[in-house]
Image (tube, helix red, strand yellow):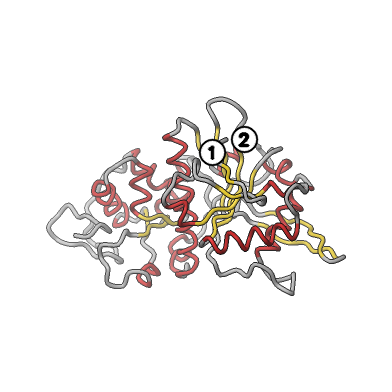
Amino acid sequence: MGSGETATNTTRRPRYRRAEDSPAFRVTEGDIAIIRNIARHRFLRSTHIAALAGRSLDRTNDRLCHLYHAGYVDRPRAQLDFYPTKGSAPMVYALADRGARLLRERGIINLSRIDWGRKNLQAGRPFIEHQLEIADFEVAVQLSAERSGCHYVSAEEIASRVPGTFAADLGGNLLALRVTVSHQGGRQEIGLIPDIAFAIDLRKGAPRNFLTEIDRGTMPITRVDFSQTSIERKLRSYLSAYVSRIFERKFGWKHFRVLFVASDDNRVRSMIEALRSIQPPGAAGSSLFLFASREALHSADPLTAAWRGVDGSLRRLLL
């Protein structure tokens, strides 16, 4: 049996079709925590879920197997594009309709009344890959904060701390906003949606607030047509949001950093050069951004790893 699923009986259950004879079982508080984590992150690997639960992978897979066949969680079929033959690869999970209904009934999360099964079927490979890369970083930060004795504050908790500023509904997007960007004598309204918003409540001192962009290496650094997406346009959008104090009004954040997790070191250098062309070191807002490659973060704790600023200096997030 691979790490994607552990069965407790002698008959292997289907991996992407719910068993007709799935035995009844009692949903525990631990199971509800698993469903809630999956709902928060949209997609999680079994390894993510085990780490967040503080359980062994085998025990976690056993519960996930029961939850899947009982209809509380889903296994998106698009992951077959990743692992068509590798049964030992970590399984990817998503929220299912019964799980969403359970969370609503318990008053745990405000979830849209949509067809989650259909939503999962419609999710394609590129979207799932990006969501898993987001989860890789967010789970690593959450676990790092817990090890440090700090409290990780998710976007949903940020919303609860600033009532009335934006809807805490996981069927929509908690982070979406509009900013007006000036460029080459013109003004353009641009949609800005950070991949992650989080804060770290320190044992002493003010919370540290962060917005994060997870780069896949596919977006051009610059474009001739500013109406098209680019890293430069993202940088200008965040600078505009900073100057206009949008995040202070939306989140109550007077101070924050924007983190770019780049696909490799070459992308880090290119992003920094793009930022320098917009806001050179020492200019207002230039210190807002920090950059690190995905490879560097894989081998280091994200909260204590060295992040690079626009001036080339290395900094840590909690110092």
Residue that badge 1 annotates:
153
Q: Amino acid at mark 2?
A: Arg
Tell me if mark 2 has few (under 14), some (14-19) or many (20+) residues whose alpha carbon lies within 10 angstroms of its own: few
Say whether residue 12 is left or right of residue 60.
Answer: left
Q: Position of residue 122 (x, y in %)?
A: 47, 69
Residue assigned mark 2: 161
**Where in the figure is residue 51, as x and y percent of width and height?**
35, 45
Quadrant (top left/top right/bottom left/bottom right) for the C terminus = top right
- Quadrant for residue 163, please give it: top right
* Residue at the limit of the structure toward the front, as seen here: 312
Label 1 sits on a secondary structure element that is: strand
Camera-side mark, 2 or 1: 1
Residue 52 spot, x, y in % from top left? 38, 43
* Disc on the earlier residue, 2 or 1: 1
- Toward the viewer: 298 or 139? 298
Residue visible at 35% across and 38% down in the picture: 29
Alpha carbons under labels 2 and 1: distance apart: 10 Å
Side of 303 relative to 311 (left or right): left
Element assignment for label 2: helix
| Residue type at the position of mark 1 | Val
Q: Residue at x 21, y 62 (%)?
A: 13
**Residue 310 versus residue 100: which sits nearer the camera?**
310
Whether tag 2 and tag 1 are in contact, CB under 8 A, the answer is yes
Residue at x 27% of width, y 72% of height = 85
Compared with 270, 26 (above or below) is above
User: Residue lying furthest right in this view?
Assistant: 185
Q: Residues within 10 Å of mark 1 (few under 14, many from 20)?
A: some
Q: Residue furthest top?
A: 204
